[in-house]
Amino acid sequence: MTVLKTAAASADRTIELLEGLVNLDSASDHAEGVNRVGGVLADRLRSLGFSVEMVPAPPPYGEHVVGRLGPGPYEALIVGHMDTALPRGTADKRPFSQEGERMFGVGVHDMKGGIACSIVALEALLGVHPDVGGIAVLFNSDEEPGSPHSRQVLRDLAGETKRALILEPGSERAQVTTGRKGVGIFHLRVTGIASHAGSEPERGASAVHDLGHKALCCLGLADPALGTTVNIGAIRGGTYPYVVAERAEMGLDVRVWSTEEAQRVEAGLEAVSGMSFVPRTQTELRGSFHRPPMEHTPANQEVFEDFRQVAAEIGLDLEASVRGGASDGNLTSAWGVPTLDGLGPPGGGSHGNDEFIYAESLAERTCLLALALERFTSQP
């Protein structure tokens, strides 16, 4: 059988694997649950001939799964994350289910669907070409909070690979992701002087008042025309209405499409933190862009074109899309590795109680990955 026929005939196996993964609770801070998922995936990779390394991460994260099929440099690096965004225990309350054309469950969309498709695609490829090599895999445990530990593991693997394939879900049935916004998380903390608001207000210096002015300045750094957004997601400060506030702080989320915008906003935040709207207050700025933008590059476009040609073989007219959310593809692309994202099955509701994928997309994405890997890897 050809790789395409083998992959197409594997729909039941993909569903079976997906159901098992979804029903294993693997919240980012639930190391034991993530390690159960990692154990299942490590066993499947070993059965295919991969050498597998379980890379420990500091608490509260589980182990990362690194698989290598043959020596580097690798033709393709497959990247997925095992952790989910909802609290531990949610998978027990809301296990895998199917209603009509939709499959539901925690992480089914983000992104256990993509992981299941990749494993079965590898099985189809190696079932037809048992001596193939040149593939590396990373299933990490800490992507939802920004890959704080696994990004170094990813960088080491990225240095050995020719292209990165990211298993985040696609936007629509025939869409993959070629661009993502960069993400910056920043915190401004103002320290003032407490005093009685009625009898001695002049002795105080309100951190809350100063931070209020700074908040407006930060919002002014947004540029809707360029897609640059600034969200103040949390503000805390003060104690009681009758006390001049000694402390106040806020957390900001910044999203940008380009490196130039990231640099502009970061410089703007530095300038705001250096201002003093209330004398005798002091301001501390912390944070950075932990996910650089995944920008359109000729190298990324080349990988997309390869996938377009492969997709045509299964009747898909593949389209490029861009997303406001970030992924590990932001990192590999910024490091100069040709990257294509959004290769997992499409659906919706990520991080919510109605998360789903389209059932028919499982077979399509499995076939797409299997054919692309056959195209990229060297044959003996």
Image (cartoon, grey):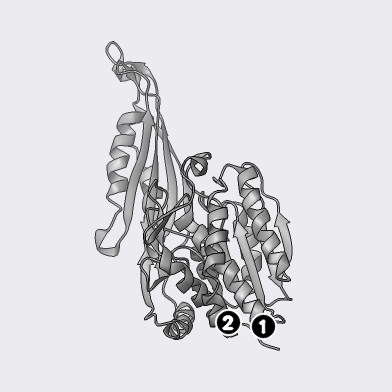
Q: Which quarter of the image is occupied by the N terminus?
A: bottom right
Q: Secondary structure at mark 2?
A: helix
The residue pinned by badge 1 equals 129
Residue at 33%, 30% in the rendered image: 208
Toward the viewer: 59 or 125? 125
Rendered view: 319 above or below 95? below
The image quarter containing residue 40 is bottom right
Marks 1 and 2 close (CB-CB < 8 Å): yes
Indicate the amino acid at tag 2.
Val
Q: Position of residue 78 (x, y in %)?
A: 58, 69
Q: Secondary structure at mark 1?
A: loop
- Asked if residue 259 can be seen in this view, the reply is no
Residue positioned most to the bottom: 380
Q: Which quarter of the image is occupied by the C terminus?
A: bottom right
The disc label shown at residue 3, or none: 2
Residue positioned most to the left: 225
What's the distance in space between the residues labelled 1 and 2, CA to CA? 8 Å
Q: Position of residue 29 (x, y in %)?
A: 57, 42
